[in-house]
Structure formats: C-alpha cells, structure tokens
Image (cartoon, grey):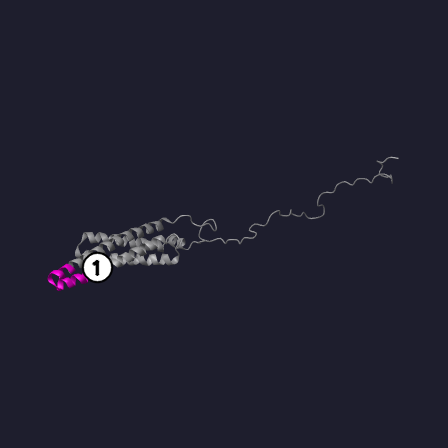
Amino acid sequence: MSFGDPNNPYGPPPQQPPTAPGYGYPQQPPAPTGPPPGYGFPQQPAYPGYPGGNAMPQSMPGLMVTARVMLYIVAAVQALIGISAMFGAATINDASNAGEDTFGGNSFSDLGHASAGIIFVMALLFLGLAGLSITLGVKFSRGGQGIRITTMIYGILGALFGLLILIGAADAGSSAVLIWALLWIGFGGVMAAAMIAPTGSAWFNRPRY
C-alpha cells in the first residue's frame, strides 16, 4: 500500500494545483490606505486671469509701482506747499497786527488779515491733499476697486489742473510755471493710466485672504 497512490482510499487526498489568481472574476483595486485628497478641507476654486490656477501675483506690476512713487512725490510737494503757506499766512497776519498797533485800524491791515485767511485755507487744502496722496499710495498693497477708482479720478483731476496752469503759463510767458504745469500733467496722466490699464485692474481684482 502506497500513500502516494492517488487511488488509495486511505491515503491523503491529492493536492490540487493552485488556481490563477482572480480567474473568472474581475480584479478589484486595492483599498486606499489614507483619506482622499482634500478630505475635510474645502477645495479652493481656481481664479482666472493668472497662470497657475489660484496662484496669486507675488509682486506689484511696474506701472503700479511707478504710480505709487508718484503719489508719494506729489504728497511731499503738497505738504511743503501747505507748510510754507501756513508760515506765510502767519507772517502776513503778524504784519497786519503790527500795522494796526502802530497806525490803528486801516484798509491795509484789513487786506492783510483777509489775505492771511485765504492763504491759510489754501494751506489746509494742500495738507489735506497730501494726506490723501499718502493714503492712496499706502492702500495700493491691499486696496480694492475703491482705491483704484479714487486714484484714477485723482490723476485725471490733477492732469486737468496742470492743463489749466499750462494755459495760464502760455498766456503769461512764464517758463518756470510752464515746466511745473507739464510735470503736473505728466504725474496725473501716469497715475490715471496705471489705473485704467489691464494690469491695474487685475491687481486690484486679485483674491485676498
């Protein structure tokens, strides 16, 4: 009696050959070992207009930087004019007071007081414009469409003001005032153009977190 005989009823059962894995059944993909991508976190939508999906621009466009620097320059000039005008108004007012003390009330002293008041109001106006210019320049980094529209209007009005000075300088024949008017027109034109350009619109429309 042989235990290796397949016809022996007392021997061990014959070993079955291994079947091919998955024979007759479709293969199942392995179960994932971790959470699906984005599990537990909302997916951020891609923002059009910038390469790389929702990548934000890392630096301010060059035209915007130029407009920002011009705002700071204009603010410095406006502040100097305002401070100088305040000192001028105070000097005229002191001279008018001295004239009243010496000669009593007279028309020249009254004219001096009126002139000092007008110059003082103009000084406050220039100082207020200087504050506006600085505020607009600072808000370029995180400002929205309101800053863009305000800067655009501000630049257009500045260019128109320079144009009026240019016309007056041409009539008076003053070269110094002519140069001043051209500079004012250039600064205002560049600021307005930077806000109208597509790069300016895209910068102020960028997503913020």
User: Could you say whether the residue bearing mark 1 is in a helix, strand or loop?
Assistant: helix
> x and y percent of residue 36 in the render?
58, 50
Asked whether 98 falls inside the magenta stretch, the response is yes
Q: How many labels does the image show?
A: 1
Indicate whether 158 appears above or below 18. Answer: below
Q: Quadrant of residue 132?
A: bottom left
Give the amino acid at mark 1. Ile
Residue at image location 23% in from the left, 53% down from the top: 180
Instruction: Give the left or right position of residue 77, taking residue 92 as reference.
Output: right
Q: Indicate the position of residue 93 as horizontal and vertical percent values.
A: 18, 59
Residue at (35, 55) in percent of width and height: 195
Assign the magenta stretch its main secondary structure.
Answer: helix
Quadrant into which the N terminus falls: top right
* 37 on left or right of 158: right
Residue 57 location (% of width, % of height) = 42, 49
Residue range highlighted in magenta: 97-120
Residue at image location 30% in from the left, 58% down from the top: 156
Q: Mark 1 points at which residue?
A: 119
